[in-house]
Structures are given as C-alpha cells and as structure tokens.
Image: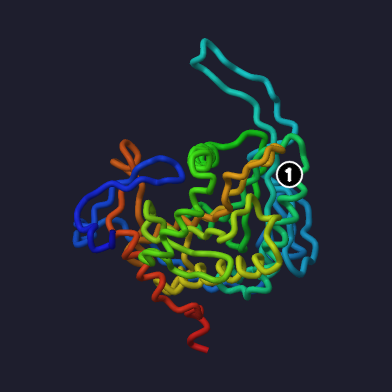
Amino acid sequence: MKHTDFQYPHRRKNILTGEWILVSPNRTVRPWQGEVSEIEFETRPEYDTNCYLCPGNKRANGEYNPNYKDTFVFTNDFSALLENSDNNISNNGNLLIAKGEKGTCRVVNFSPRHDLTLAEMDEKEIYKVIDAWRDEFKKLSLNPVINHIQIFENKGSVMGNSNPHPHCQIWAQESIPLETAKELKQFTKYYKKNNRTILQDYLKLELKLDDRIVYKNESFIVLVPFWAVWPYETLIISKRKIENIIQLSKKEQNDFANALKAITTKYDNLFNTSFPYSSGIHQAPTDGKKYREWHFHMHFYPPLLRSASVKKFMVGYEMLAEPQRDITPEYSAKVLKGLSQIHYKNKAK
C-alpha cells in the first residue's frame, strides 16, 4: 500500500508497543492561531564560565569538573535513582501500591565544547560518544542490581533540558520500565511465532516499499516509522540483529556515528535551527537472561511541527484517548530524506 492511499482519517498500529494512533491527513490545511514559541537562535560560546558542565567549572554540588578533552561522564548531582534506596514495599489493600527502586543516573558530556551538539560534531567525535555509551553500559550491566539501562538525550529547553551544554543521560535501574516492557512483550510474541525479530521483517518490508526511509548505510536504516506519533519522529535500526550497544563491531560503530550525524543534521536543516528532540536507545534488559528476540534500535521524538516556532502538543484527545497526528509519516520521510547532510551553518562558510 503506497502513501497515496492514506488520504483520509485512519488508525495505525505501533507494532513495537501494540498501541494505536489516529492519523488525520485531511487536517493539514487548517490555519494555525495557537501558540508560537520563541525560536532558539542563541549563539553559544565554546566555553561558558557560568556553565556547570564546562571543563574546570564548579558544579552545583560543589565539585569541580576536570579539564576533560573528549567526553566526560559523572554521576548526576541530582539523581532520580539512588543505589541505597529503601526497598520497603507498600501494598495497602492492593490499592496503595509502591516499592523502592534502586539505581543510578549518569551524565555524559559529549565534548568540552559548550556550543557543539551532535549535529555539529564530526563523526569521529560522535564515535567517542558512542565509546562512552558502550563503556558505561558494560560497567553498569555488571552490577547485579541493574536490570535495565536507558541512554537518552533531551535536546533543547522545550524538551526540559536544564543545561545547554550538549550532554545526555544514562539511567540504570533494577526494574524493567514501562516502554521497554511493552516492546519486550511484542518482540517476544513475534519471535516465538516466526523465529525472527519483528524489526528484521519490518526492515525488509520498509526497504521494499521505500516510502519512509530517510537515510541508510551498510549497518543502519533511519526511517520514519509507519506508526510515528511525533511529526518528524524517526527510528534508527541496526540491520544486524543485536541486543545491545557493546555488540556493535567497529564498522557498525562507525556507521552508527554516521547515521546519528546524518539524522541530527537533517533535523537542524529542516527549519534552520538547533532542532529539539528527546532520543533514546532501546536495548535488551541486563538481568542476565538471553534476549534473542530483541533488536537494537534508537528513537527520536522531536516536537516541532510546522516551523521552528510551532510545536505539536499532546493534549486533549491524545491524553484522554490515543495519540493523533495530521501530516502522514510518508510526507515527513520525504521531507527529511530531501534535506542536505551538510549542516546549514556550514553552507554559508
């Protein structure tokens, strides 16, 4: 079925979660008189004396950062998870249910440069970021308390980023959280029936149709998923079935850096702005079990809709019923695919 067949309201199923989304392409012509946000066009210096994350600076907890030259990883000064959390359980009449949760939160500064996002870093620099992710994943997964590791980035103040110095976070915890649990259920169900991962077969179909593919190299495919919720949502999927980041070969790690550079640059080029998003890598749990059904992938959830100043809101129907979008994933993929891989700031040089 081609994208031209999707002209009227319809629902699409997210095969990774089992959930549904309403798509209403007939609404794309509606005028916009809602909120228009201020565009983030600020020019940041290479080093900011007031930044808690820049090299040599004092952090909020009083510690000083080393004069790091590449990536720098440290435990979050305001961690959402603690290693010594109380494990007491509350279950008052099966109505007031709570349990302690142990874990740790790490911060990964991409580089000493206060002004360089992934989109503006070169692939060798991004490779070093992936190295840091691999090292942290390996160390954290050896902790018997840690059963899940979530690597994620909130880019831009609109996504709740409290510090503009380019960085990401790693939250490691003893429970398998909701989104991973939903995907694991779907992965397991499909693998038991087909002896292949659901993303293996999905990639094969997407490559055949070529309606939603944005970018590809030898090891990774970047696409707008058929069930995308956010206007320019994308997935990076490994061609080879692997469970986690430490299973990447050197070639695959280079190609992963290349794919990250490509999609983040295209995002910035879409509206000529530092494009905000939340992104995260979904990997198999680290509880010591084998997860042959799992398939390494990374989500990008960007909020911008019509321009750098207009974003999509998840309110009303989305909060009370199910997600909804206007522009089709096929349209979004066509737009992203057509964008240059040369960052807009470099075109003027």
- Percent of width and height locating residue 173: 66, 38
Which residue is at a point 73% across and 52% down the rendered structure image?
136
Q: Is residue 159 above or below residue 140?
A: below
Q: Residue at x 75, y 55 (%)?
A: 135
Q: Residue at x 49, y 64 (%)?
A: 222
Q: Amino acid at mark 1?
A: Ser
Query: Toward which corner of the image does residue 309 lie, by quadrant?
Result: bottom left
- Front-most of residues 91 and 112: 91
Residues 187 and 121: in front is 187
The residue labelled by disc 1 is 141
The residue at the far bottom in this view is: 349
Which residue appears at 32% of the width and 48% of the height?
A: 12
Towards the viewer: 276 or 290: 290
Q: Does residue 66 sit above or below 147 in this rendering? A: below
Q: Is residue 66 left or right of residue 147?
A: right
Instruction: Return the x and y of residue 311 as percentages of the image width and height.
Output: 36, 58
Measured along the vertical axis of the image, is residue 39 above or below residue 141? below
Q: Position of residue 132 (x, y in %)?
A: 72, 59
Q: Residue furthest top?
A: 93
Q: Position of residue 14 (x, y in %)?
A: 40, 46
